[in-house]
Image: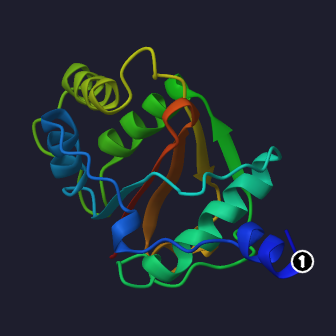
């Protein structure tokens, strides 16, 4: 293989609309509908081809965002900052708790009406179980700790944004909830 072929093979392949992976599970649809009461929701799934191979977590997230950035401009997320700022890594249970907190906190003006703690827990658990069932339930989730990572979150009053990776199936999920006062 010559140097040009090697560079083409190693180049970052941007996502397109064809890169999106359709996940149409009723519990997920229900969760997204309730999250929509908390603000604007962007939810997209991908199966990167070629897969993201970086071992360092910051490098993995950076490559994913670089590949997603062109497509993000066509969504409410808008421009993604190359220096995306601080993030936390969550396991599946921490992610469940974080989503639960988003549901219970709600948006700028109210939380979803009539949603008890027990029902919110059930909603989150059932959605994640539908999308990431055992034996593929292990997740690595990147939670953005700064709103500066994207145009949507930077301009919002309150936001929560995640990139979840289920490595065994090479399934990635971008989830962002942002509300404006």
Tell me which residue sits at (15%, 50%) in the image: 33
**Residue sitting at the far front:** 1
Nearer to me, 113 or 83: 83
Nearer to me, 180 or 153: 153
Give the quadrant of residue 14: bottom right
Nearer to me, 120 or 110: 120
Is the C terminus in the top left, top right, bottom left or bottom right quadrant?
bottom left
Residue 40 image offset from top left, x and y in percent: 28, 67
Q: How many marks?
A: 1
Residue 152 image offset from top left, x and y in percent: 44, 77
Dot 1: within a 10 Å radius of its alpha carbon, few (fewer than 14), some, or many (20 or more) residues? few
**Residue sitting at the far top:** 135
Element under disc 1: helix
Horizontal arrangement in the rendering, residue 14 relative to residue 1 (left or right): left
**Residue sitting at the far right:** 3
* Residue indicated by mark 1: 3
Horizontal arrangement in the rendering, residue 159 relative to residue 119 (left or right): right
The chosen color scheme is rainbow
Tell me which residue sits at (25%, 62%) in the image: 109
Q: Do we see residue 72 in this rendering?
A: yes
Nearer to me, 89 or 2: 2
Tell me which residue sits at (83%, 47%) in the image: 56
Residue 101 image offset from top left, x and y in percent: 41, 38
Is the N terminus in the top left, top right, bottom left or bottom right quadrant?
bottom right
Give above or below for 144 relative to 129. Answer: below
Residue 82 image offset from top left, x and y in percent: 71, 77
Q: Do we see residue 179 in this rendering?
A: no
Horizontal arrangement in the rendering, residue 149 relative to residue 60 (left or right): left
Give above or below for 10 relative to 48. Answer: below
Tell me which residue sits at (30%, 58%) in the image: 107
């Amino acid at each position: 293989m010559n140097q040009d072929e090697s560079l083409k093979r190693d180049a970052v392949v941007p996502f397109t609309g064809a890169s999106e992976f359709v996940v149409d599970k009723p519990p997920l649809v229900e969760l997204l509908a309730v999250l929509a009461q908390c603000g604007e929701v962007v939810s997209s799934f991908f199966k990167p081809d070629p897969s993201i191979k970086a071992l360092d977590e910051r490098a993995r997230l950076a490559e994913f965002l670089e590949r997603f950035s062109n497509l993000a401009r066509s969504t409410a997320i808008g421009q993604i900052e190359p220096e995306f700022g601080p993030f936390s890594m969550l396991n599946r249970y921490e992610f469940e708790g974080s989503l639960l907190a988003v549901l219970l906190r709600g948006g700028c003006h109210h939380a979803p009406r009539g949603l008890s703690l027990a029902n919110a827990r059930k909603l989150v658990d059932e959605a994640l179980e539908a999308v990431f069932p055992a034996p593929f339930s292990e997740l690595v989730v990147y939670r953005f700790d700064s709103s500066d990572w994207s145009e949507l979150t930077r301009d919002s009053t309150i936001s929560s944004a995640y990139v979840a990776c289920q490595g065994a199936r090479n399934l990635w999920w971008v989830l962002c909830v942002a509300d404006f006062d």
